[in-house]
Image (cartoon, rainbow, N blue to C red):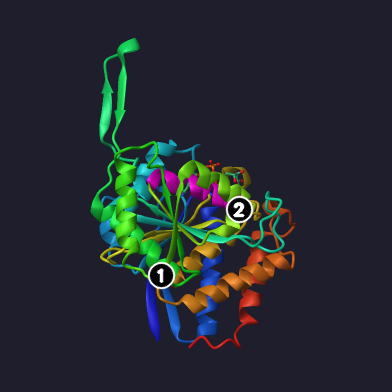
Amino acid sequence: MKEWNIAVIPGDGIGKEVVPEALRVLDTAADIHGNIKFNYTDFPWGSDYYVEHGMMMPEDGIEQLKEFDAIFLGAVGDPSLVPDHISLWGLLLKIRREFEQSINVRPAKYFEGLKSPLVNPNNFNFVVVRENSEGEYSEVGGLIHKGEDQIAIQNSIFTRKGTENVMHYAFELAKTRKGHVTSATKSNGIIHTMPFWDEVFSDIKDEYENIETKKWHIDALAALFVTRPFDFDVIVGSNLFGDILTDIGGAIMGSIGIAPSANINVPGKYPSMFEPVHGSAPDIVGKNIANPVGQIWTAKLMLDHFGEKELGDTVLSAIEDATRTGYKTPDIGGNYSTTEVTDEICKQLISKKTVDLS
Ligand code: NAI
Ligand code: MG
């Protein structure tokens, strides 16, 4: 029996509603697999914790999380209790940085039965691999002078190590998919970092004979995500470019409530963290109508990370079956509750038990 120890942080708002549902699906997945077990340890950190203790997590929070195989997080933020910059920096960003989760992975795909805003979604299915720790989002720079003489300088940091890392990850991922990597660049306008990015891409590409590649400037690429998203497989981008592209990815799927993400510590020295793209959705909290799909698809990414790709794919196909047959929450045009959608996904999963997963 393989056992995985998972630190669970439901966080705030609908995080507390969708996380238990996703754990229910994970346990059902473990049942149909028969030879795998998930042990959960709950950490009640977030905005309520802040109100009581004056911090988002305990001083030794990072230490407590270190030994787990993964962190499974809901959403963090409750602007009625804690300003967003405090909740974000005090928990999420702290974990991402301390655990060197230098890569953010966000898949997007067309779901049958789900209304994409695109006229021709044509079964698009891609993954954006985003550099998650440097690039344009560095803290290097500053402001000088006041008034009309004021100057603001923001430096971008591109290390060879970080750039090679994210590209290697993208190429390795492409090997398990359609074998195509697109590089998001802007070497026509940004004259130092982006030609460097292109050069590293070209070096890494040479290590992967069987992977096809293409290079697009970010502006044209953003447009193609709207007009021809079905042309892509794996896209690799810097922190800023990846950030923008992944929001388009979420938008063309039809709801932010279904988009998943993974923050990966590549060497495996620290735990990776799995969280949906959406936030705590204070406007719908407590109504049992939050879409659980983003959190459940996130669980599938965690299964992939554990090396249980086939089981992960089975979970995704159970999600798709539920959506196709109309089990949808209101955000995607359905009448079903969070619990009912999850029930159906578990039911679909059980019906796949005959698939050989050993
Ligand atoms: P949000 O993602 O929480 O909500 C945006 C809109 O999408 C809302 O109308 C909400 O009802 C809807 N929505 C989101 N997830 C949904 C789901 N699963 N099912 C159905 N509808 C869903 O973003 P917002 O309102 O900007 O932020 C609310 C709080 O969440 C803030 O405190 C913010 O800082 C935090 N936040 C946290 C994130 C995280 O933990 N990674 C990411 C984004 C926001
Ligand atoms: Mg964003």
Q: Respond yes or no on whether mark 1 lies under 8 Å from ligand 1.
A: no
**269 and 119: which is toward the camera:** 119
Count numbered badges in the picture.
Answer: 2
Magenta part of the protein: which range?
Answer: 239-252
Above or below 194: residue 269: below
What amino acid type should be assigned to the residue bearing mark 2? Answer: Arg
Q: Residue at x 35, y 47 (%)?
A: 93
Asked if residue 206 lies left or right of residue 119, the reply is left
Residue 96 is one of the magenta-drawn residues: no
In the rendered image, residue 52, in percent from the top left (x then y), is placed at: 39, 44
Name the residue located 61 percent from the left edge and 43 percent from the top edge: 283
Nearer to me, 261 or 125: 125
In the rendered view, would you say 184 is above or below 170?
above
Q: Residue at x 69, y 54 (%)?
A: 120
Instruction: Please tell me how crowded label 1 is: few (under 14), some (14-19), or many (20+) other residues with Cα within 10 Å.
Output: some
> Can residue 309 be seen at all in this image of the molecule?
yes
Q: Residue 150 carries which label?
A: none
Is 245 a magenta residue? yes
- Give the camera-side residue of 1 and 177: 177
Disc 1 secondary structure class: helix
Element under disc 2: loop
Q: How far apart are marks 1 and 2 (CA)?
A: 29 Å
Q: Mark 2 points at which residue?
A: 228
Q: Residue 305 carries which label?
A: 1
Looking at the picture, which amino acid does disc 1 mark?
His
In the image, farthest residue toward the top: 148
Vertical relation: 273 (above or below) 331: below
